[in-house]
Amino acid sequence: MSETNEDLSELNFEDALKRLEDIVRKLESGDVPLDQSIALYSEGEKLRGLCQKRLEAAQAKIEKITLDRDGKPKATVPFDAD
């Protein structure tokens, strides 16, 4: 059930998010014993951190193209630089 840190780090964003959603559903159902709930919560927190890091890395790669007066591309700037 619970994956190791190495296994989690090998997940792509979509698989990590799907696993996190599965964990949330199980925890919200209330049908999971306390010890298992604690383990699931811990795994979910690791997955949340992994997804957050992947999103931040993707956002850092996004660039906005700036145009000169003639409408031609002149440079790129970070997406959120405005």
Image (spheres, helix red, strand yellow):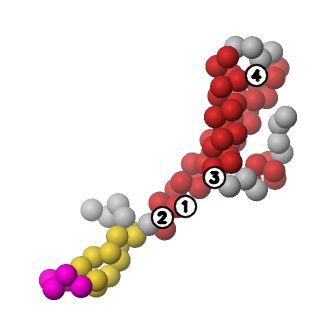
Amino acid at circle 1: Ala
Check disc 1: other Cα within 10 Å, few if <14, some if 14-19, many if 20+: few
Badges 2 and 4: C-beta atoms under 8 Å apart? Answer: no
How far from the left and from the top, in percent, is residue 57? Answer: 54, 61
For the residues labelled 1 and 2, say whether their Cβ atoms are less than 8 Å apart: yes
- Point out residue 72 in the picture as x, y percentages from the top left corner: 24, 85
Find numbered disc 2 in the image and state the secondary structure of the residue it sits on.
Answer: helix
Highlighted magenta segment, given as a residue range: 68-72
Which of 19 and 37 lies nearest the eye of the viewer?
19
Mark 1 highlights which residue? 57
Residue named by callout 2: 60
Residue at image mark 4: 37
Query: Residue 13 bears which disc, if any?
Result: 3
User: Residue flagged by tag 2: what amino acid is it?
Assistant: Ala
Q: Earlier in the sequence, mark 4 or mark 3?
A: 3
Q: Could you give the CA–CA distance between mark 3 and mark 2, rounded to whole angstroms?
A: 16 Å
Secondary structure type for disc 3? helix
Magenta run includes residue 29: no
Distance between the Cα atoms at labels 1 and 2? 5 Å
Task: Give the quarter of the image for residue 67.
Answer: bottom left
- Give the number of the mark in front: 1 or 3: 3
Specify few, some or many for label 4: CA neighbours under 10 Å numbering under 14, 14-19, or 20 or more.
some
